């Protein structure tokens, strides 16, 4: 059962990544067909982000009430329904309407699955699973490209991904009895917590979870990481073109390599994650990102260094997200992990939603040259907050 459920979770993470890059890949055509400005893509993504934040914050109560298997199946089903809605939408307001269940489903399943894997599986699986998310996010632009070049239109891409999500929903519904039987005791939780609440069913209100010592530190670190990742994804190609003289086609190609670097880096990190631990992965990731930002900033005549810096930046980003999630039961206890991971997801979506437009506003005033400095500030914030949490955890262990 352990292997069967793990295989289903791997497939679920691939499926989770599939819809995330569809809008970006199809919007150049979609906005023309819908008769709206190209900037309106931000409205849809903001609605989706709002839904994910709300459902992430509610995930702890919902998951404890219905169980992670039910929440995952229903959430993926909700996402599938939203994708079918996208495929039939002939106007912009309909896309906005279907973006609501899209966001609600995505946030709930993200928080529920991440906590389940953090509690029940080793660190290597968390890295590989998030690598699978990157694989899914890399596949969907090809699906959109195929449907557009074949003359089927952008709606067919949403239909195809919606069908894949519906098939996964059926598989998840069948697998619901397995979720409570696989490795019910966490290898990452304290013994006294397991004995006090072996099933981890005690409700932890959000207000109580936020007041747990160290939670605000990890929320800030997670916000900083997701802010820098999303800012680099959106603005690095423009920076390379305007500040480093890179050809637009080359900048676009290396932007893809940045995402592939995150995906490949997570698969690679999985092979040694259990040996070096989550703290070292987070620390090493932030330091590597800092190195990439420095290489981006160097005012050299050659563009090779800046391009290499972007790839290194992606490799550095790779282990941070999975390691922060996987370390949550260790840092705060299994009983509190679902509530805290839900808040972490909300912090992540907040950072990835608001940091790119914030940088856009700053760069309009200062110039695009400030991107490496902006990333460096976020790296410093994330690293300092995570190190402060590590120090707090070490003091707690010594006291015990």
Image: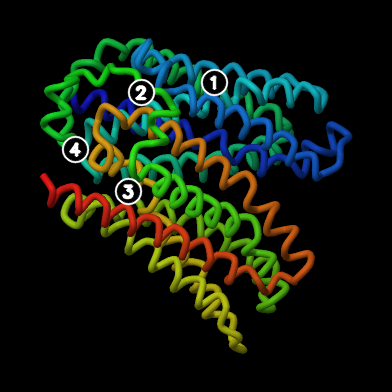
Question: For the residues marked 4 and 2, what is the alpha-carbon distance in whole angstroms?
Answer: 19 Å
Give the class, few, some or many, for how many residues have Cα within 10 Å of label 1's Cα (few <14, many ≥20): some
State which tag comes first along the sequence, 1 or 2: 1
State which tag comes first along the sequence, 4 or 2: 4
Vertical relation: 136 (above or below) 162: below
Front: mark 3 or 2: 2
Q: Residue 176 location, x and y as percent?
A: 31, 12
Q: Quick check: marks 1 and 2 in contact, CB under 8 Å? A: no
Identify the residue position indicated by label 1 in the image. Answer: 163
Label 4 sits on a secondary structure element that is loop
Give the residue displayed 52% in from the left and 24% down from the top: 55
Q: Quadrant of residue 20?
A: top right
Which of the two residues, 112 or 86, is positioned nearer the viewer here?
Answer: 112
Give the residue displayed 15% in from the left and 48% down from the top: 397
Q: Residue 44 location, x and y as percent?
A: 71, 34
Image quadrant in which the C terminus is located:
top left
What label does residue 323 carry, if any?
A: 3
Question: For the residues marked 3 and 2, what is the alpha-carbon distance in whole angstroms?
Answer: 23 Å
In the image, taking residue 361 as reference, residue 61 lies left or right, namely left
View extreme (bottom): residue: 301
Vertical relation: 235 (above or below) 302: above
Q: Quick check: marks 4 and 2 in contact, CB under 8 Å? A: no
Indicate the colouring scheme.
rainbow
State which tag comes first along the sequence, 3 or 2: 2
In the image, taking residue 181 as reference, residue 303 lies left or right, namely right
């Amino acid at each position: 059962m352990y292997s069967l459920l793990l295989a289903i979770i791997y497939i679920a993470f691939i499926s989770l990544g599939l819809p995330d890059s569809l809008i970006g890949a199809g919007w150049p055509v979609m906005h023309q067909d819908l008769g709206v400005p190209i900037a309106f893509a931000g409205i849809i993504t903001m609605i989706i982000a709002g839904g994910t934040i709300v459902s992430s914050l509610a995930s702890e109560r919902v998951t404890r009430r219905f169980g992670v298997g039910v929440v995952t199946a229903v959430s993926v089903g909700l996402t599938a329904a939203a994708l079918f809605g996208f495929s039939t939408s002939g106007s912009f307001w309909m896309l906005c309407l279907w973006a609501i269940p899209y966001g609600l489903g995505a946030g709930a399943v993200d928080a529920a699955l991440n906590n389940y894997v953090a509690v029940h599986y080793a660190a290597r699986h968390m890295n590989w699973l998030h690598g699978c998310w990157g694989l899914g996010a890399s596949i969907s632009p090809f699906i959109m490209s195929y449907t557009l070049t074949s003359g089927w239109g952008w709606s067919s891409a949403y239909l195809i991904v919606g069908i894949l999500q519906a098939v996964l929903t059926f598989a998840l519904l069948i697998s619901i009895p397995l979720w409570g039987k696989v490795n019910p005791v966490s290898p990452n939780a304290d013994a006294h917590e397991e004995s006090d609440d072996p099933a981890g069913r005690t409700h932890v209100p959000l207000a109580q979870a936020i007041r747990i010592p160290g939670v605000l530190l990890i929320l800030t670190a997670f916000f900083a990481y997701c802010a820098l990742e999303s800012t680099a994804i959106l603005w690095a190609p423009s920076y390379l073109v305007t500040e480093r003289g890179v050809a637009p086609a080359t900048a676009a190609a290396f932007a893809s390599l940045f995402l592939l670097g995150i995906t490949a880096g997570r698969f690679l990190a999985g092979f040694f994650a259990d040996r070096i631990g989550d703290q070292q992965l987070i620390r090493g990731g932030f330091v590597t990102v800092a190195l990439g930002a420095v290489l981006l900033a160097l005012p050299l005549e050659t563009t090779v260094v800046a391009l290499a810096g972007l790839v290194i930046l992606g490799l550095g980003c790779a282990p941070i997200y999975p390691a922060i999630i996987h370390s949550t039961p260790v840092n705060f206890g299994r009983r509190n992990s679902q509530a805290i991971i839900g808040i972490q997801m909300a912090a992540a979506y907040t950072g990835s939603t608001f940091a790119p437009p914030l940088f856009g506003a700053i760069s309009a005033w200062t110039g695009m040259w400030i991107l490496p400095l902006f990333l460096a500030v976020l790296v410093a914030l994330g690293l300092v907050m995570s190190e402060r949490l590590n120090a707090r955890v070490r003091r707690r262990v010594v006291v015990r």
